[in-house]
Image (cartoon, helix red, strand yellow):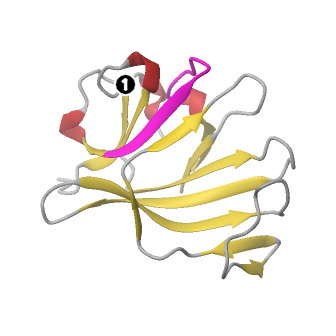
Amino acid sequence: MNLFAGGICLSLALAGGPPAVFLPWEHFTLAWMHSIEKVRWEEDYAVVRDAGGVWSLQAVESRVKGSGAGMDPPPGAVWRDGWFVHRPAAIRVDVLRLSRSDFVPDYELCTATGCHPLSHHLPSDGGTTLVQACGAGQLRTQPGSGNSG
């Protein structure tokens, strides 16, 4: 029995309804290609629950392959194995708001088993997709077969 029972919920901002997809992941990486510089950016997150039972995302680490055009590495980042690597202070995030467009490659969600475009889990409507930590019981719409990590 998994006592954690948390993960991430994905939904389309314009849909205005409950989360559309639940992914039972305690840790994941959000990755994308910068639209101007064409370099990869990755951010690692952990799903956490506070003593009051509130779910949130904990930023763990970020990595970027280069800099420029508004994507400079944060202060304190170190160069390691071809990446600027940064470990932020304990930052909790309620929701990630991802702007998705047909003009740039889709975001990727990665786990230990590999990476898949966000569209593998939830199709884009060309607007904003919300990613937030949640409990399995918060999902009202059952996910399709595309929720394997």
In the displayed structure, would residue 95 be above or below residue 59? above
Instruction: Check disc 1 and give the amino acid type.
Output: Ala
Q: Nearer the viewer, residue 121 or 91?
A: 91
Residue shown at 35%/20% (left/top)? 16
The answer to whether residue 122 is left or right of residue 70 is: left
In the displayed structure, would residue 103 be above or below residue 7? above
- Quadrant in which residue 80 is drawn: bottom right
Q: Secondary structure at mark 1?
A: loop
In the displayed structure, would residue 119 be above or below residue 35? above
Image location of residue 129, percent across then percent down = 50, 31
Q: Nearer the viewer, residue 81 or 70?
A: 70
Image location of residue 22, percent across then percent down = 35, 35
Residue shown at 47%/76% (left/top)? 89
131 in the magenta segment: yes
Residue shown at 61%/39% (left/top)? 116
Residue corresponding to mark 1: 20
- Quadrant in which residue 106 is drawn: top right
The answer to whether residue 66 is left or right of residue 9 is: right
Q: How many marks?
A: 1
Residue shown at 17%/53% (left/top)? 1
Please, which residue is most extreme toward the front here? 70
The residues colored magenta run 121-133
Image location of residue 42, percent across then percent down = 65, 57
